[in-house]
Amino acid sequence: MSGDDASGDEAAVYARERRHFQPDPRPVAPGMLECPICGTSAGRFLPFGLSGRRNARCPGCGSAERHRFLWLYLATRTRLLARRLRVLHTAPEPCLAAKLRGRPNWRYVTVDRFDPAADRRADLTALPFPDGAFDLVLSSHVLEHIRDDRQAMAELARVLRPGGEALLAVPFDPDTARSPEAPAEATPAERQALFGHPWHFRFYGRDLVDRLAAAGLTACRIDSPAMLTPQARRHFRINRNYLFHARKPSG
């Protein structure tokens, strides 16, 4: 990571990150790897993220491991794609938004603080939607970027209808009981040193489920090794990943 990445210019960091989600226009030789989102076959995937993680990004659609895991869960372990739903997607990744926008049975809305392509520009701690406006929320690796994540969780619960669902992904360590937090006075450079990103305020431990419960959401954890065979994980290039399927109680 360059010095500019930890300079404190939040919008610039996220603009650079958005470029990492773009597909590679160069021809790709087919191989043993496959992206379940776009169907691209390749012998090797591309680096991804500010740190340039190797063999992670699909050259066809720009997806990383967490996006492919979320898509596989959504497509193969739920019936959400087939239902008529009002859907809110926070910080929409182009690889997923391209698959989800325009679905005839979904009313699909995206929200982001900085992305000019989002339908609404807003902070997750103050969403511009009425109570119960959505049936489903999709949010991948967003909550760790928000200083007051408990308020953001409460807002996500508020805009869900009773009985609504949320698929949430965050940096997560199952061996950590309590989520480590950056000190309030920490600089972007210090957060970079702590969490590998200048605008990560924490990574999450097992108390994430309790945080979600306090916001009004019950959640179960989905682990990629439990859901996918080792062969499938190698084929789709999915590392150890975690997804939380949360629900707002009906009553």
Image (cartoon, helix red, strand yellow):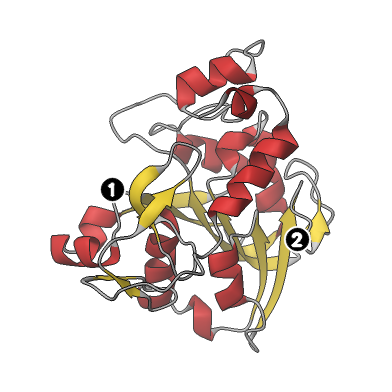
Q: Residues within 10 Å of mark 2 (few under 14, many from 20)?
A: some
Q: Residues within 10 Å of mark 1 (few under 14, many from 20)?
A: few
Q: Residue at x 79, y 56 (%)?
A: 116
- Which label belongs to residue 20? none
Q: Is residue 124 above or below residue 29?
A: above
Is residue 182 visible in the rendered structure shown here? no
| Residue denoted by label 2 | 118
Residue located at (45% from left, 33% from top): 204
Residue 179: x percent and y percent? 45, 26
Q: Which quadrant would the C terminus be assigned to in this image?
A: bottom right
**With 136 as the anchor, is 203 left or right in this view?**
left
Along the viewing direction, whichever of 232 and 40 lies nearer the viewer: 40
Q: Residue at x 55, y 27 (%)?
A: 2
Q: Is residue 246 left or right of residue 162?
A: left
Q: Indicate left or right for 2 with 126 as reference.
A: left
> Percent from the top left, x then y, of residue 171?
44, 39
Q: Which residue is painted at 25% across and 67% down in the image?
A: 43
Query: Is 47 left, or right, of 236 in this rendering?
Result: right
The percent coordinates of residue 60 (x first, y second) are: 45, 71
Q: Which mark is residue 240?
A: 1
Q: Which one is nearer the viewer's eye here, 154 or 105? A: 105
Q: Position of residue 3 (x, y in %)?
A: 59, 22
User: SS class of the residue under badge 1?
Assistant: loop
Type of amino acid under label 1: Arg
Identify which amino acid the numbered label 2 is placed on.
Answer: Ala
Q: Relative to 93, does residue 216 appear above or below in the rendering? A: above
How many marks do you count on the picture?
A: 2
